[in-house]
Amino acid sequence: DEGVLPVDIMRLGSMQGIVKVQYSTEDGSARAGKQYKAQKGEVIFEDQEFRRSIEIETIASPYWAPTLEFKLHLSEPKNCTLGTYLHSCRVKVIDGDTFPSSRYQDLLSQGEKGVRQIRSVGLFWQFWKLCFFQVPGIAWRTLL
């Protein structure tokens, strides 16, 4: 679903004084503008503050994907030092939609009774759309 994903940034070491750090997102399997909204900005930790949260907007898609992944990078520290291995991380979002699309989600939530109502041709059509529109290069190879 479309929404907001909170990502915490932790301050380690001395909690004295105000420190600042820049942050930015980078595409992984998730693409900015398609599955999430790219962001960059500045996080300011006040004196004695050890955690700040930023919010990354996610974009809803009718198609299923096992995970969406992007990176978050920290840079340009002011009054602090970035950890050798703690200046970037991968953010993974597990897709809660039903496979191959959310079209049959209501029927699937009914259990076996709902599953029996799903027509095979309809399910195949949803699978075909998933492959055709989501797998890079499959559309033109199919048409050739």
Image (cartoon, helix red, strand yellow):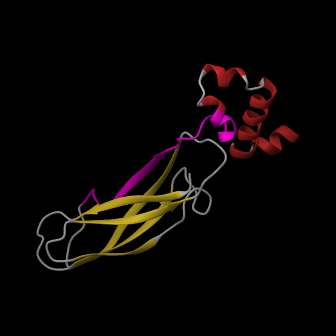
Task: Using residue 28 as the reference point, say whether residue 46 is left or right of it.
Answer: left
Q: Is residue 140 above or below residue 31?
A: above
Q: Which residues are magenta?
A: 84-106
Picture coordinates of residue 44 (x, y %)?
A: 28, 77
Is residue 136 visible from the viewing direction of this image?
no
Residue in front for this viewpoint, 111 or 95: 111
Q: Residue at x 87, y 41 (%)?
A: 143
Picture coordinates of residue 43 (x, y %)?
A: 32, 74
Picture coordinates of residue 58 (x, y %)?
A: 53, 58
Q: Residue at x 79, y 31 (%)?
A: 122
Q: Residue at x 66, y 31 (%)?
A: 107
Which quadrant of the structure image shows residue 45? bottom left
Magenta region includes residue 100: yes
Picture coordinates of residue 140 (x, y %)?
A: 82, 45
Q: Residue at x 62, y 58 (%)?
A: 34
Task: Using residue 40 as the reference point, say whether residue 128 is left or right of it.
Answer: right
Is residue 6 visible from the viewing direction of this image?
yes
Q: Is residue 127 above or below residue 5?
A: above
Q: Is residue 85 above or below residue 128?
A: below
Magenta region includes residue 115: no
Task: Using residue 49 as the reference point, say whether residue 116 is left or right of it.
Answer: right
Residue in front for this viewpoint, 34 or 107: 107
